Image (cartoon, rainbow, N blue to C red):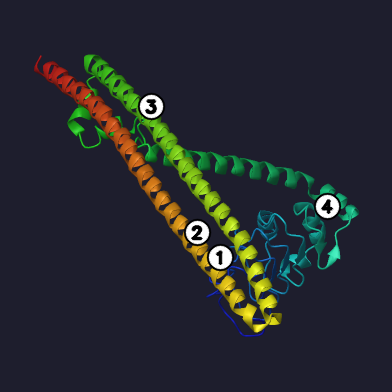
Amino acid sequence: MDNNCIEKIENLEALVNLTELDLSFNKISKIENLDALSNLKKLSLFDNLITVIENLDNLKNLTILSIGRNEISDWNNIIYLRKLPILKSLNLAENPCARKENFRYYIATYLPDLVYYEYRQITLIEREIGDEIFHDDYIVMMEREKEELGKKLTKMIEEQDAQIHADSFVEYLNTRRLFESLFENDPEGSALLLMGGESKNLYITYEENIFGLCKEIFNMGQEKYRMRQSEAEEFNKSVKDIQQHSQAESISLMENFMNKKSEVFSEMNRLKNRSFYQISHDRKKMEESIEEIRKIYENMLHQTRKVLMKLETRLYERMNELNETYEHNLTDLINNFIEEAQEMFSRMREVITEYNDSLQVLINK
């Protein structure tokens, strides 16, 4: 697609198996819409109007990038390329950034896994010189990357935990969010806290009781979730075992059939060959033998088909029985969870009522 006066990268989403893409000598000003091309290994954007290297995060297989003769001036674009784990060859020639002093040494330092720049191998001496020039800045950048990676890992763990909590039907119950929500639309209740003294003590006790119950529900929900997961794992294992056993039986049956079939056809061919050379009065007897073998084969075929159908029926029945058992067990687990949760929420309502009654007594004094 080079030399086509293309101004925008688009309509490439279906080319998921593409490994090379040449968009050189166009009028592209922005790198975009390449997320689906995760198998891309070689990308050329030479001689365009690009000012920023971006939106290449998904191209984890990219090894060769040619983006020379564009409008890239900021050296921070090089730091972005560190997101490409197996990038080995880079060309940024004839960009404003490449005309600045020590740029090749900067490349050698900030892209330590890069092998070629402008199609020339980066030498050890160039890396050592770059380290001397940019050592302090590189250390700062590494610390920043480490901090960002830590934040990303923390966020990922939090998201995974949040998903587990959601699957457990207890999201946010390990925090004070539920308790705080009780006062969101209650300005009068919040105002009473300003009185201090006894009202403050009531509030503290109220908070401890509500949060304690929330933690009970949360822990119970986690335990019930683990039980459901264990039930699901056992179900999946049973499904796999049943399918593998049925498949093994079918394969064994077909192998036995194919062996017998080979024997039958060999005998059939032998008889046919003999009948060709037999005198006419023996040929009829030979044909009768062939007919008998044909009937044996048809009966064998019928019996094999019959057994295969029986195996298929048995597989269906066992799978149906397994599904019903799993559904029954899962329903019991969910109902048990609901009953325990309802009991805990009833206790929570009692705590709320007790707090409101205590506040009312305090107000009436």
Q: Nearer the viewer, mark 2 or mark 3?
A: 2
Q: What residue appears at the point 41 percent right and 36 percent down from the top-left corner?
A: 231
57 vs 100, left or right, is left
Q: Earlier in the sequence, mark 3 or mark 4?
A: 4
Identify the mark at residue 304; answer none if there is no mark.
2
N-terminal-most mark, 1 or 4: 1
**Above-or-below relation of 112 to 116:** above
The CA distance from mark 2 to mark 1 is 48 Å
Judged left or right of residue 277, residue 287 is left
**Res 266 quadrant in image:** bottom right
Asked whether residue 149 appears in the rendered view, the answer is yes
Q: Secondary structure at mark 1?
A: loop
Secondary structure at numbered mark 4: helix
Q: Which mark, residue 130? A: 4
Question: In x, y percent, where is residue 27?
Answer: 62, 80
Image: 202 above or below 7: above
Q: Quickly name the residue at label 1.
A: 36
Instruction: Work out whether mark 2 precedes mark 3 in sequence or the reverse, and give the earlier one.
Output: 3
Residue at mark 4 to residue at mark 2: CA–CA distance:
75 Å
Q: Quadrant of the N terminus?
A: bottom right
- CB under 8 Å between discs 1 and 4: no
Please state which amino acid type lies under the numbered disc 2: Thr
The kind of residue on which mark 3 rests is: Asn
**Figure quadrant of residue 357:** top left
Q: Earlier in the sequence, mark 3 or mark 1?
A: 1
- Please name the residue shown 76% across and 73% down the image: 94
Left/right of residue 224 with respect to residue 254 in the rendered view:
left
The percent position of residue 108, horizontal first and vertical second, equals 81, 55
**Residue at image mark 3:** 219
Circle nearer the N terminus (2, 1): 1
Question: Judging from the image, what secondary structure is the residue with disc 3 in?
Answer: helix
**Amino acid type shown at disc 1:** Ala
